Amino acid sequence: MTESHEQELVQRLRDGDESAFAELIDAYGATMLRVAQMFVRDRASAEEVVQETWLAVINGIERFEGRSSLKTWLFRILTNRAKTRGQRDGRTVPFSSLAGAGEEDEPSVDPDRFLGADSAEPGAWAAPPRAWPQDKILEKETLGVIQMAIEELPDAQREVIRLRDVEGWTPMEVADALEITDGNQRVLLHRARSKVRAALERYLDPDIAGGTA
Amino acid sequence: MSLLTRPLPCQELVELVTAYFDGSLSWTDRRRFRRHIGGCDNCAAYVEQMRLVIKASGRLTEDDIDPAAREELLEAFRGWKDERA
C-alpha cells in the first residue's frame, strides 16, 4: 500500500466509509486472524481479538498520526491484545522459546553432505546441490510442494516465512508485528527457507537429496 | 592468516544466506560471502536455489478472509458508525 493511498484510506475511514473498511479487511483480515492465533488458545479467542482490534482501529483512527504505517499500527494493536489475552489464558507462545533460538543446533543442510573434519577440506560440499530445471519451479505441482513444506513448519517459522516471502513484508514489519527482534525473525526465516529448499530438492532432485534438515 | 581473510567453508556459508539477502552481514562477512560464491559453483548453485525458493513462495496465494467473518465485520462497522454518529 502506497503512502498516499494509505492517507486517503485513513481519511475515508474517519468519514465512516464502509468500502475503506472493507479494503482494509481484505488486505489484512486473514493475516490478522493467523497472527492472533499464534498468541491465543483457540480460534474463537483469535476471532474475538481481531474483532476487538478492528473496534480499536475505528475508535482510534481520529488519533492516528501516521508516524508508523497504518499496517504497522494495526498489527501493533492486534499483537498487544492477542498477547494479553494469551497470557490471561495461560497459552505458551511459540515465540517465547525464541530466546534460545540460536542455541539448539538445527543445521540448514544435512551435515552428511559436507566433508568431515578429517578430510582435506573440512566443511566443503561432498554432495553438492545441482541446478534445478528453471521451467519447473513455478509449475503448479512445485508450488504445491512448497505450500505443503510451509504448512509442516513449526508455528513461528511458518508464520515468519508466510509474512516475509508469501506476503512480502519487510523484516522490520515482521519484527514489529510479532514483537520479536530483527535477529529472531531472521533466524526463523532462515530455518523456514532452508527446510522449504530441502523439501523442494527432495522433489526436484530426489537422487541427491538425502535426509536434509 | 588474519581473521579477515579466513576462508568461509561451504557448511558455514549455507547458514548465512538469509542474512546476506537481508543485507545484515558485517562488511567483512559480506566480503567473505561474495568471494566464496564467486569461486565456488556449488555454493553459487545453493544460493540460487534459495533465491528460487523465495521467488516461488511469492507466487503462492495469500489467504483470503472467510466470507462470513468478513460480513460480520462489515456489519459491526455499521454498528460502530451508528453509535458514533
Image (cartoon, coloured by chain):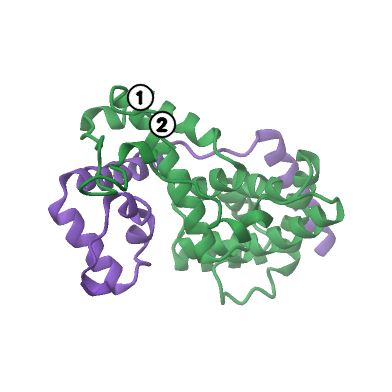
- Mark carried by residue A203: 1
Total number of numbered discs in the rendering: 2
Left or right of residue B12: residue A92: right
Q: Chain of mark 1?
A: A
Q: Kindly tell me whether residue B11 is visible in this rendering.
A: yes
- Mark carried by residue B85: none
Left or right of residue A53: residue A1: left
- Mark carried by residue A199: 2
Instruction: Provide residue B52's location: percent of width, then percent of height.
Output: 30, 41
Camera-side residue of B24 and A38? B24
Up the image or down, A69 lies above or below A206; here it is below
Q: Quadrant of residue A84?
A: bottom right
> Which type of secondary structure does the marked residue at label 1 adopt?
helix
Left or right of residue B63: residue A210: left
The residue lying furthest to the front in this view is: A118
Q: In percent of the image, x 79 and y 53: which residue is there?
A: A86
